[in-house]
Structure formats: C-alpha cells, structure tokens
Image (cartoon, grey):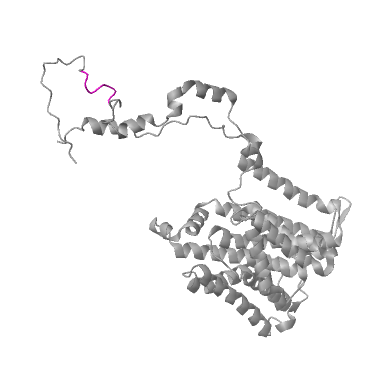
Amino acid sequence: MAAPKTRDAAAHGAYIAAPAPLRPRPAPLSGLLAPQRFMNGLGLLLFIAALALPFITASPYVISILTSAFIYVMIAMGLNVVVGYAGLLDLGYIAFVAVGAYTSGILSTQLGWSMLETIPAVVVACILAGIVIGGPTLRLRSDYLAIVTLGFGEIIRITATNLDVTGGASGIHGIPTWSFFGWSFADGLDLGGIHFSAKILFYYFVVIVALGLATVGAARLSRGKLGRAWKSIRDDEDASEAMGINGYTTKLSAYIIGAVWGGLAGTLLATHLSAISPPSFEFLYSALILMAVVLGGMGSTPGVIIGALFVSLAPEFLREFSEWRYLIFGVLLVVVMIFRPSGLWPANAVLPFLKRRKPPAEAVAGADAAVPSDAAARPHAAVDAVARPDAEGAPDPAGQDPESTPPDVSPAAPAAPEQEEVR
C-alpha cells in the first residue's frame, strides 16, 4: 500500500494551474467578419469579378494577358505545394509544365486526340516525371535538392530540343483548342443574343479551372491531414519523423501533386499559345514562378495569387517604358522584398480590422475591480511564496499558519510522526 503524500507535495500540487489573465481578451468574431468566412467571401467576389470582366471590356489584348496571368496563377499554386507547404526548393518546376504541354501537343497534333482526351495521359506523364526525379533526389535537402531540380529542368528542355517527336528547336505548331463531344471553342457560342468568341470562351474556361478548381483544390489540400504533414516536414523534418511521419513519402507526394498541377497548367498554356518550343521553358520562367511564390508569401493562397498576378502583369503595365521596363520591374521586386520580407500576404498574416480590436469596456472595468491592487502589482506572489516556503511571512501552502494549532486538535496531543514520501 502506497504511503500518502506529504503536506508539501499536496501543497505544490494545488498550484499547478496557470493564473487567470488579468485582462479579458476580445471575443472571436462571428458572421461575415470571421477571418475564414471573410476570406472565402472575398475570394468569391474576385472570382465573380473575373467572370464579369468580358462584359466590361472584351479587348483581345486584355483577354489574352489575363488568360496568361491566370494560367501563371495555376502554375504558382502547384509550386506553392512543393515550396510553400512541403519546403522543397525547386528551381526546375517549369519542366513539369513542359511535360504537360508537350504531351498534350504531341497527342493532339500527331494522333488527332482532343485536348480533353489527352488529360489522362498528361496526368500519368507528370506522375512518372515526378517519381523519376523525386524518387532518387528527395532524400537530399536544401541546396543539393535545388541543384538537382535545376539540372532536371535543363535536361527536359535540351531533350525537347533534340528529339524529332517534339519538333526539335522549332517545337510544335497548330495545337487545337479545347473541344467537348464534337463542339469546340472555335465554333463560338451565342447565348441570350450575345456572341462569345473562341478567346472569350477559353478565358472563361481558364478562370473556372485555374482560379476555381486548381486554387480551391490546393488550398483544401493544405488544410487536410496531408497538408499538415507537409507543413510539419517543412518546419522540422527530424521532429516530424520522430512523431511517426514518413518524411520521404510525404515529400514525394507533394512533389507528384505539384507536378500534376504544373502539367495540367501546361496543357492550358499550349492551347493558349497554339505553339510551343524549347525557349518557352527556359530557367528564367522557373525563376519567375518561384519569385511569384516567394513574393506573395510562401504557403499563403491569397499571397501566391497576388504574387503571380504581379509577376505576370507588371511587365505589361510597364510596357510603355520600352527597354526600361525590366529594370523598373527588377527595382520594384527589390523594394517589395526589402519592405515585405515575408511576402505581400504571408501565411500568418492578420486581417487589418483584427489588429485594432479591443475588449468591451464593461469587461475591462470588471476585471480591474476584481483584481486587488497588490495582486496587480505582484501577480505571481502566491507562486513565489510556494517556491520559497521558508521565507519570512510566507503563507502556509495549506492555508494555515504552521505555528498555529488546528482548532480540533488538543495542544497536549502528541503530533503524528511525519511519513516519508514514497518515490
């Protein structure tokens, strides 16, 4: 039979709980101002605005550059899975875009497949490419992985330059637009007395696929079990493996999913350009996509969207400066990274209207009245007294003066022998 605890052990056990806060915290927001609901509503409004844009201006130039920008958003979301969520530095991500573009281009121009029929082949090709490059190299870390992925991107480009099936240095031309069961975007569409041209229809298709399905899908992945495993590997791989997470398979899954995202975006890019060639997949484009992720905020869905739009649209807005536009673009990037080192919208960003919130005045007044003046000056006085029970004037842990006699015990009664604590 175990011996009972001593008075000191029981007294110390009574002070395990942390002290209550001296000031009340603001109540969490509900309704439309709740952070997650507010961001979902804002994203829905921007999505509706993108759908309504052709009714405001249907200029071929505006529709073309916005289509390219939204395709870059999808590419950046795929790279964000690899870099932002899993923490894998990939300098050759444009190679997966090339795999998807060339696969769909070859099947559509040489075998007569529709773009919709090429999607399964594109997914399989991207998965194989992700396994081939990620299988032997994802055991590397940091700079070594970056160098290997950079080499992989150059290998894909050089291989496409030297193969006849890819068209060599000239590339593939005449890539058809999307068609569904005999109806093609090239046929146009008349709806409610409004004629939608092929470029407008493809713009809507890119908005739905890139801004809708791809962006929402990547964001949902980050909040699931697999996404939490990616972030755990990114923060501390050794600690994650000690907690039972298989670091190798987790990183490989992020690499494959990112490859599929890039390959599907490559099919959209091939259709938009109608012609692809090796110079379209140089290292510069990998650097620009990585810049979009870092500039917007790694691991942040709204940040990556902002970064991709900035990187893709800023050179177009600066086109009037002619040869100076890339210099100005570089200066803007440097300025943004100096003043926003974590990105334009980092993953831990707090909405502006949440920073200025204060607790209700009634709660603050009630808390001030409930806190004694000496307790406010020394909030840890009770804890200090327990830590120093022999100090002069310190209260007894049991709530009584050690020299006083309990009322129900006679002074003449012999004291019970103190039992030793069983360790």
Which residue is pictured at 68% across the width and 73% down the height? 281
Which residue is pictured at 58% across the width and 68% down the height? 90
Quarter of the view holding residue 238: bottom left
Q: Viewed as shown, does residue 195 lie left or right of 275?
A: right
Q: In the rendered image, is residue 80 in sight? A: yes
* Residue reaching furthest to the front: 392
Which residue is pictured at 19% across the width and 32% down the height? 4
Tell me where residue 327 appears, x and y as whole percent. Answer: 76, 67
Task: Quadrant for the N terminus, please.
Answer: top left
* Residue reaching furthest to the right: 193
Looking at the rendering, the stretch of residues picked out in magenta corresponds to: 398-404
Eyeballing the image, is 281 above or below 201?
Answer: below
Tell me where residue 5 appears, x and y as whole percent. Answer: 21, 33
Quarter of the view holding residue 210: bottom right
Please state which of residues 80 and 413 is positioned toward the viewer in this rendering. Answer: 413
> Count the marks: how many?
0
